[in-house]
Amino acid sequence: MLNDQELLRYSRQILLQHVDIDGQLRLKQSRVLIVGLGGLGSPVALYLAAAGVGELHLADFDTVDLTNLQRQIIHDTNSVGMSKVDSAIRRLSAINPQIQLIAHRAALDEDSLAAAVATVDLVLDCSDNFSTREAVNAACVAAGKPLVSGAAIRLEGQLSVFDPRRPESPCYHCLYGHGSEAELTCSEAGVIGPLVGLVGSLQALEALKLLAGFGEPLVGRLLLIDALGTRFRELRVKRDPGCSVCGPAHA
């Protein structure tokens, strides 16, 4: 049940007929893994904590650097040198002391990632490299857990939802294959702060829709964001029947 403080705290979203008391209870009972507490993970964690998602598992092996503060809004100047997980826990606890925060401070290998994914209801990939995205996707497909994936670099962003519970849903590998050896990071190519905030906020919104059970998630659709021209474009994405991760031979 929701106590009086929770009813007051979440009253504005409970007023929405798409959420209501039942949806808020589903959020309270949900467990979510956030992989990466940088530019994308910052708004994701802040909004999910504020919305009352009951248990947030926070995974990041990095420490806060001064160059992070231009876009990683969950951290502040006093966090420089601190573990990103510890910095995030400090901020999230202040925003909402009624939720549970589970720390994953070490880099997740195949076994620990599989274990972390198995204990939650939904995963948000907020990482900044292809190898991590591939590993998170494989773990979600194996465990049958929905994955909300976002990315942003320079002035371009993208977002999609991969849900192995739906037979028509592609996975991350269906869309990107083996990726590119020449992928760039934000430290090499640059990125504008509000863009990662926008993508992360949309990731949080997709997660709330999936957890509370309302709206139409971005399954089978890829949202492309052009921040330079303020344009949004949507592409349909189909499942690859020969996918080496989610294809029938690997089911």
Image (cartoon, helix red, strand yellow):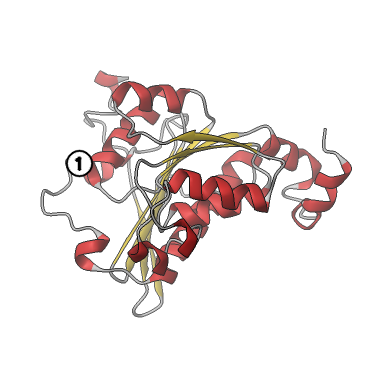
Whether residue 174 sits left or right of residue 77 in the image: it is left
Q: Quadrant of residue 101?
A: top right
Quadrant for residue 67, please give it: bottom left
Up the image or down, 102 lies above or below 155; here it is above
As rendered, which of 42 and 225 lies closer to the eye?
42
Q: Is residue 180 above or below residue 12?
A: above
Q: Pinpoint residue 208: horizontal percent, then vertical percent.
A: 60, 47
Residue 150 x, y percent position in the rendering? 39, 52
Within 10 Å of disc 1 (Cα), the crowding (few <14, some 14-19, many 20+) is some
Compare residues 242 and 223 and report the one nearer the observer. 223
Q: Is residue 155 visible?
A: yes
Q: Residue at x 27, y 27 (%)?
A: 247
Does dot 1 land on a helix, a strand or a loop?
Answer: loop
Q: Could you tell me the amino acid type at mark 1?
A: Gly
Residue farthest toward the bottom in the current orientation of the protein: 229
| Residue most extreme to the right | 4
x, y (%) of residue 184?
Answer: 19, 58
Residue drawn at (32%, 38%) of the image: 239
User: To which residue does mark 1 refer?
Assistant: 177
